[in-house]
Amino acid sequence: MSKSRGELFRDPVKGKIAGVCAGLAEYFGWEAWLVRILVVSGVLLGMGWFVILYIAGWFILDKKPSKYSAKDVAKSVKEKLHEEEVFGESIKVKAKIWQAGEPPKQAIRDINLKFKSLEHELRNMERYVTSPEFTVSREINKL
């Protein structure tokens, strides 16, 4: 992997019980369902120490710190995450089914949405620059 993994946290927001599997999945760049299947399979196949490790992870790992301020609470978490994913950072497309990221169709939709938003901003700038208001404002600033 080219990027550093960072710290290991448990993610109770995305998790089912305590967020240990979701935290591990985010740390390794996998899908959370894959980690859950591996843990449940291990428990069912007689490796009971998975339960002990899960409970230990529940108590040892810190909760993932929230990156939202109080004013962002009004927006739903899903809308905010989608907005940041589309407009704030690069879109990660998964190449293999177990990797974290977006399916290619969703990535194309997000890229299309991003380009439409940029085109709208560009049109607004062009409309302002070609307006008489801009010309008058520029002439006043020259004085």
Image (cartoon, rainbow, N blue to C red):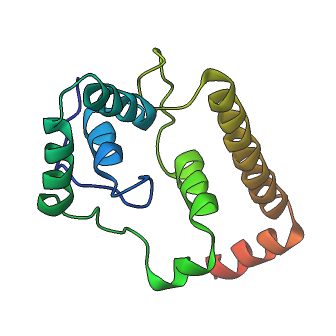
**124, above or below 41, in the image:** below
Residue at image position (37%, 35%) is 36
Question: To which quarter of the image does residue 96 belong?
Answer: top left
Left or right: 12, with 84 as reference point? left
- Which residue ends up furthest to the right in the rendered image? 132
Q: In front: 116, or 77?
A: 77
Q: Position of residue 3 (x, y in %)?
A: 23, 32
Left or right: 61, with 130 as reference point? left
Residue at image position (65%, 34%) is 111
**Tag count in the figure?**
0
Q: In front: 135, or 32?
A: 32
Left or right: 118, with 33 as reference point? right
Q: In front: 67, or 24?
A: 24
Quarter of the C terminus within the rendering:
bottom right
Left or right: 33, with 44 as reference point? right
Residue at image position (33%, 32%) is 29
Quarter of the N terminus within the rendering:
top left
Residue at image position (19%, 37%) is 50
Q: Position of residue 79 (x, y in %)?
A: 64, 60
Q: Position of residue 81 (x, y in %)?
A: 54, 56
Q: Position of residue 68 (x, y in %)?
A: 43, 72
